[in-house]
Amino acid sequence: MRARLIASGFVLVALAIPGCGTESTTDTASMPVLSTRAIVGRLELPWDMAFLEDGTMFFTEKCRGLSVRLPSGEIRKLYGMRGSSGYAASSEDLFCEGQGGMMGVAVDPDFATNRAVFVYSSAKFANGPVNLVMRVKVDPSFSKVSERSDIVADIAYKSKASNHPFGGPGSHNGGRIRFSPADGYLYITTGDNHKGIAPTSPVIIAGKILRVDRDGKAAPGNQPPPGFDPRVFTFGHRNPQGIAFRPGDNRPFAAEHGPWHSDEVTALVNGGNAGWDPRPNMAGRAECPDDYCGYSPNQMAAMDPRLRAEYMPMTDLQTYPDAMRPAWNNNGLSQGLLCNTFLSGAKWKAWDGRMVVGFSGIGIHGTPFGNRLDVLKISADGLRATSETVSWPTAAGRFRSAVQGPDGNLYVAIEDQGVIYRVTPE
């Protein structure tokens, strides 16, 4: 372990932590020296960020709305949700509840010509609540938005509490959206809503990752199983809340919040099954509350190492031997894997080309080592990884979003602090 003092910031510590049972071999002398600076504060539950090339940063607050930070540092509130104030415009159909709210944000690759920004949000219509992805147009002065179009408006939302632990409304809501630099299509992560049939259902848009065009139509070349919604890129997910594209080959990788015993990072395969199937009465499972086997009794055994072999895995290779295999599984712990991004550039030294993942780590499910960022070295085939932990020297809270900016620096949003930081390799 090596710690380095940074005059302009504070100490960051790199710890070698095994991933999937393998040890990190990075020489600490080749790691970047990091400093940090808070660039936006006094936020309420910051959830995501997206950049323009000049450093303009769009960001969301889960229970407030969409704002923009200009290169000068000025912040303008653009589009708020129900109950918010101070925004140039707001909409009563957008709401915040539990894990739902205004979440992912992505900038159109052709923003310079079409001024389009995309946002994932929970919304309540006459026939009930849903999650949707909307496209809005930002005016040239970055003062307001217009021309809202809901390009995907049928993503499932959990609207009621359930008779099992952690079953509140809005649970397992997914919510990350990203444009692929390779094909220009929009990838959308959706959670399973604590609905046992959802991840393997061909028609319920939950427990899936979608790939669509800018109007929300299925991207040509999607290869879901027969009978599936053509927008589906992968299925069999629990609660993927991160998606990022590896520099060089632009392969998509999902970061997924697992059950009692597992968080996973997985290289996605077009049409692939992530292997999560929480339906009851499969493979001799006991009865499950609300027909959802994602918690007790099928998961509680994971809390006892002597019973580890008995729990239901997130990637069920016994039932689905052809499922996509995770590159990394957080050493058998569940700590709320919330976001991921790749680092790129020589100033990141040994971390150039590696993935950063962020955790909520609030002692969830009784597991230690939370409130942290990990740096993953993933093999070329996407099937193996080692990890190193970058520990935040203060009580950090949930690392909700991690994005590399156009300046090459890493930007992280810490939900509990209400702060967005810039992390710079010196």
Image (cartoon, helix red, strand yellow):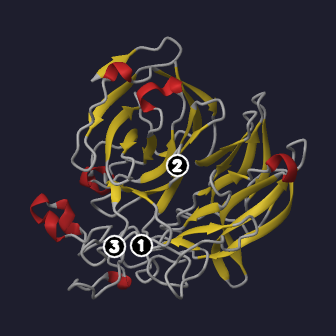
Above or below, 44 relative to 269: above
Left or right, 298 with respect to 68, comes to: left
Q: Amino acid at mark 2?
A: Asp
Disc 3 designates what residue?
322
Res 239 quadrant in image: bottom left
Left or right, 329 with respect to 82, comes to: left
Label 1 with label 3: CB-CB less than 8 Å: yes
Which label's residue is closer to the chain start, 1 or 2?
A: 2
Question: Residue furthest toward the top?
Answer: 7
Residue 213's x, y, as percent? 71, 66
Question: What secondary structure is marked by label 2?
Answer: loop
Residue 169 in sight in this render? no
Residue 185's x, y, as percent? 66, 61
Which label's residue is closer to the chain start, 1 or 3?
A: 1
Question: What secondary structure is marked by label 1?
Answer: loop
Above or below, 394 relative to 290: above
Residue visible at 75% across and 42% down in the picture: 68
Report, in whole angstroms, how far the alpha carbon at label 1 lies from the one at label 3: 8 Å
Residue 294 in sight in this render? yes
In the picture, the quarter occupied by the N terminus is: top left
What number is the disc on residue 273?
A: 1
Q: Amino acid at mark 1?
A: Asn
Mark 2 Cα-neighbour bin, 10 Å: few <14, some 14–19, many ≥20: few
Q: Which label sits in the foreground, 1 or 3?
A: 3
Tell which of 180 and 79 is nearer to you: 180
Question: What secondary structure is marked by label 3?
Answer: loop
Mark 1 Cα-neighbour bin, 10 Å: few <14, some 14–19, many ≥20: many
